[in-house]
Amino acid sequence: MTDTPAPPFALTIITQADEAFALSDALGFDAPMMALSVSIYDQPNGQMSVQALYETSGEADAALSALTVPGGAQASVAQLPDEDWVSLSQSGLAPVTAGPFFIYGEHDADKVPSDCPFPIQIEAGLAFGTGHHGTTKGCLLAFDALMGSGFDPEKVLDLGAGAGVLAIAAAMKLKRNILASDIDQDSVDVTLENAALNNVDDHINAVRADGFGHEALKDQTFDLIFANILAGPLLKMAADIAQATAKDGRVILSGILTEQADEVAAGFKAAGLTCKTQPPLEGWVTLIGKHG
């Protein structure tokens, strides 16, 4: 008989949005990942929580000790309940409607509208990006708007796919093969699992890649690139994203706080892409970029 793994220990920090992303970078988004996973969740009153999961309390305590926690932030380390902790962590997330897309977890399967064209079931596992976030919703709305204008991309890349929401949405809508990439193997695995869950696994190719160095991305151009990451990494990859965007292609960029929009747009302008800022959602903005 196989022993059931002990539930992990969660290091949780509740703080302001700009501070939350600096902490998430330090815990793994922009550094070697020592945690099992790092996730960010919206909280009331404009705050966010950063949660990193570790196998032992010692690892969680050491990670907390190595951080510079902002004054006023709430930090704690606690073992998750001895039950299906992945499902438990997602059970409080409400479904999200974004144009024709409806994103939900298994616990909300009974809430899927009967007339919804594209219901997407997402079980996040260890991957960041459940779709229950203003950044993902903004990308889906931007994608729907582009499609409504007659844009019809042949080659699509979901860069930094997380749990695969955007790749799955594109596969459903376009009925074409979609390339998804992520720096984290857990995200690649979860993307493929969610693709199968939504019956689009034949249309999703997911690879572990750091930027555009992977053979599946290198020297390729795409008609549409989703990049729902963070402002810092987006700016670092602006030149590579611009080079990988086809002449008449589009990019959909998110993970950008409202106050970061001008800086990101300027960075992509310098790389050769002109970006149009979409209406903010929950303090976040999405940019749609093109050449010229």
Image (cartoon, grey):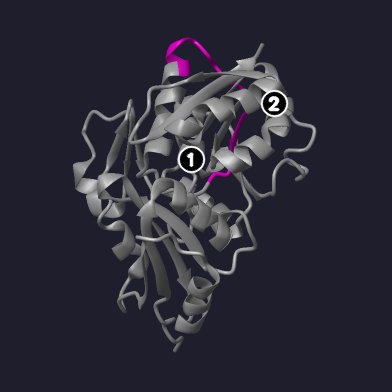
Residue 286 colored in magenta in the image: no
Query: In this picture, which residue range is highlighted in magenta?
Result: 146-161
Disc 2 is placed on an element classified as helix
Viewed as shown, does residue 34 lie left or right of 39? Answer: right
Q: Disc 1 designates what residue?
A: 200
Disc 1 is placed on an element classified as loop
Which residue is drawn at the image coordinates 48% and 46% (left, top)? 195
Which amino acid type is shown beneath numbered disc 1?
Val
Image position of 101 with respect to 120: above or below: above
Viewed as shown, does residue 118 lie left or right of 271? Answer: left
Q: Where is residue 144, by image quadrant?
A: top left
Q: Disc 2 designates what residue?
A: 242
Viewed as shown, does residue 228 lie left or right of 120? Answer: right
Q: Is residue 20 visible?
A: yes
Image position of 280 with respect to 165: above or below: above
Residue 143 rendering spot, x and y as whole percentages = 46, 24
Q: Where is residue 271, by image quadrant?
A: top right
Image position of 118 with respect to 128: above or below: above
Q: Quadrant of the C terminus?
A: top right
Residue 149 colored in magenta in the image: yes
Q: Where is residue 220, by image quadrant?
A: top right
Q: Label 1 crowding class (10 Å Cα cut-off): few <14, some 14-19, many 20+? A: many
